[in-house]
Image (cartoon, grey):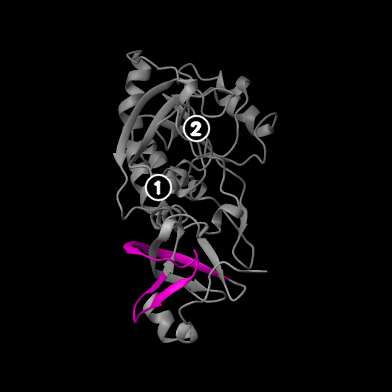
Amino acid sequence: MKIVFMGTPAFSVPILEALVQSSYEVIAVVTQPDRPVGRKKILTPSPVKKAALEHNIEVLQPEKISGSQEMERIMALEPDLIVTAAFGQFLPTKLLNVPRFGSINVHASLLPKYRGGAPVHYALINGETETGVSIMYMEKKMDAGDVISQRSLPITRNDDVGTLFDRLSLLGRDLLMETIPHIIDGTIDPVKQDETQVTFSPNITREQEILDWNKEAKQIDFQVRGMRPFPGAYTFLNGERFKIWAVTPLSNQTDKEPGTIVDIQKESILVACGNGTVVQLDEVQPAGKTRMSVAAYISGLGSQLTPGEVLGKHE
């Protein structure tokens, strides 16, 4: 059983590792090209490439897979199955049809909900109480193939993008390893997705990172957790970017305008939100500084902050 695996971020690594440690043979790994990372723009391999090299597996890195030499190489390898998990590129139909057992994708949502590149972010931002993993056959249309298997998990109050990625990665790993034998022996019953229930989760834009204080406190919390640890939600304070890393929605009510600092205590800053709700800031990051607790911020940089100041103004 020869498998070509395609993936890029850390989410994909446990899935690759499980395939490597199984009785199947991972004959090649396809991942995105090395990208510049950090302020010094150091060219950095993807987590999947690092894992593949540790196992001495051939790595292919097409900038665009369609019509590439790397695609010709995959076809020449004649894989029995292609497995993708957060690869980040569309695969042409010509390639999808090469493996005798087809091409499958491990997607971090309960399809047909949240097709696209940021399903974990949107599940949190929209306040979902559960999410999960779907394994589906791939087709040219994004995340639209028949679902082979699916498993859900609850989203907790403490979850953010980081914790959910970790949990969904392991869930996807386990579900994949349970599903492949049924694909091989033909004991699966793929289900067509209900197109009337489709929602999308396109990649997060810069604008979506900005907090809208007109939203209620619980929605501010959803957005903060849906942007943590990447890319991070922010507002503006005195015209400068002010990142918000953790908040707690309160039961308090206020008549202040959304974005107004209602109260400052030793370890918390209370901010007015939409519909008279109030949120407590717990962890922040002023421009040019590192993440810190609000207690640390108030005792230092934020010592001059006073109730009545308004967050979000940046004209």
User: Which of these two is toward me, 49 or 187?
Assistant: 187
Q: Give the vertical position of 290 relative to 218 (above or below).
A: below
Residue at image mark 1:
165
Residue 100 is tagged as none
Residue 77: horizontal and vertical position, in percent?
A: 55, 26
Tell me which amino acid carries mark 2. Thr
Residue 232: horizontal and vertical position, in percent?
A: 50, 60
Tell me which amino acid carries mark 1. Phe
* Label 1 secondary element: helix
Give the distance between the C-alpha atoms of the residues marked 1 and 2, in whole angstroms.
20 Å
Q: Residues within 10 Å of mark 2 (few under 14, many from 20)?
A: some
* Label 2 secondary element: loop
User: Which of these two is toward me, 92 or 213?
Assistant: 213
Residue 199 is tagged as 2
- Prevailing secondary structure class for the magenta stretch in the rendered image: strand
Residue situated furthest front in the rendering: 255
